[in-house]
Amino acid sequence: MREVGRFAARVLILNTLAPVFLLVALGALLQRTAFVSVNFLKEANRLTYYLGLPALLFSQLAGAFHEAAGARPMLGAMWGATLAAIVVAYGVAWVMRVPEAATGTFVQGAFRGNLAFVGLPIIYALPEVALGAGLTTRSAAVIVVAPMMVFYNVAAVVVLLLSQHPLSWKMARPFLKQLATTPPLVATVAGVSCALLGWKLPASVDKTFAALGEMALPLGLLGVGGSIVTSKLGGAWRRPLASALVKTVAAPLLGWGVGCWLGLGAAELKIVMILMACPVAVVSYTMALEMKGDEGLASGAVVLSVLTSLVTLAVIIGVF
């Protein structure tokens, strides 16, 4: 029976992770072989970020946010574990003597996971499980991901600004500008508002949003693969690797600890750990560039976290 159980676990790991990481590998192959132009996957990622992902978040939240109370413990675990990961990241950065100007980039890479383009596809590939209160693992994941993306945006802007400027009111303008121009945040607010007001979209509009949302995940994964090929790691790998390990090893362990403390069930705990173990979000590289962070550290953390997360996610899916 043990052999049967081990075989079943291996099949589950393969069937869950293979579709996600094969799409990442395909994106890298398309970029490496120049089957697509240098800018194609960047434009596809931009299309996903500005249209596909907001459509997915809006349609899911508008339809399921009235059941969001059931996901509050999971969201609390994500918030608590992420704050703990930020503290750990600052400690590791201090031990490794990361320059002050690069500390924000290091810390951002240690907590900002690719929830939308990696986390959600993995959870959608798992068997759907009812959690109670009208929620399933998939709907709960979307409800958790939306506010976490808002939190990531806020925290990323803060840590990047703090590594460039002393804390002051001068930070308010770039901070608010960054938030106001974040499409997933706008979609989250719109979806929640629509649900709270009890509005229902016409069937034709609803189907349009659903179709746009379906393109978000595969296109996003292809874009992750393309970014890996174009990223420049060079010989400076220690600091990016440390940031990636905090993100993909320490963060899910913190998620497990906080989730157990909050009394999460097995299925809920698994979702939290998967989301906490996701590789560094590609948008963290873009934001680091825009806010004068460390380009090499940002790109290296993205690349190395994809590799380290593959191991961690396999363990989470197979064991928990």
Image (cartoon, grey):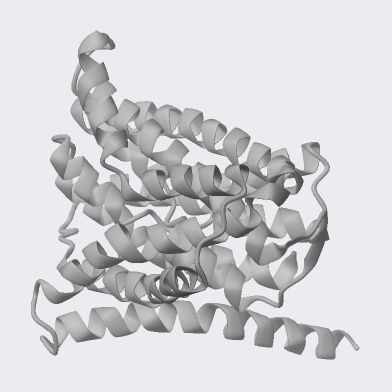
Above or below, comparing residue 288 to residue 22 in the picture:
above
Front residue of 104/88: it is 104
Q: Quadrant of the C terminus?
A: bottom right
Q: Is residue 121 visible?
A: yes
Residue 27 x/y as whole percent: 27, 80
> Residue at 60% of width from left, 68% of height from top?
123
Residue 124 x/y as whole percent: 59, 73
- Residue 291 placement: quadrant: top left
Above or below, comparing residue 168 to residue 161 in the picture:
above
- Left or right, 139 with reference to 160: right
Above or below, comparing residue 60 to residue 253 in the picture:
below
> Residue at 32% of width from left, 39% of height from top?
106
Residue 107 x/y as whole percent: 36, 36
Q: Is residue 98 visible?
A: no
- Left or right, 101 with reference to 201: left
- Left or right, 317 with reference to 115: right
> Residue at 42% of width from left, 65% of height from top?
117
Q: Residue furthest top?
A: 168
Q: Residue furthest right?
A: 1
Q: Quadrant of the N terminus?
A: bottom right
Residue 139 x/y as whole percent: 65, 61
Front residue of 178/55: it is 55
Front residue of 237/155: it is 155
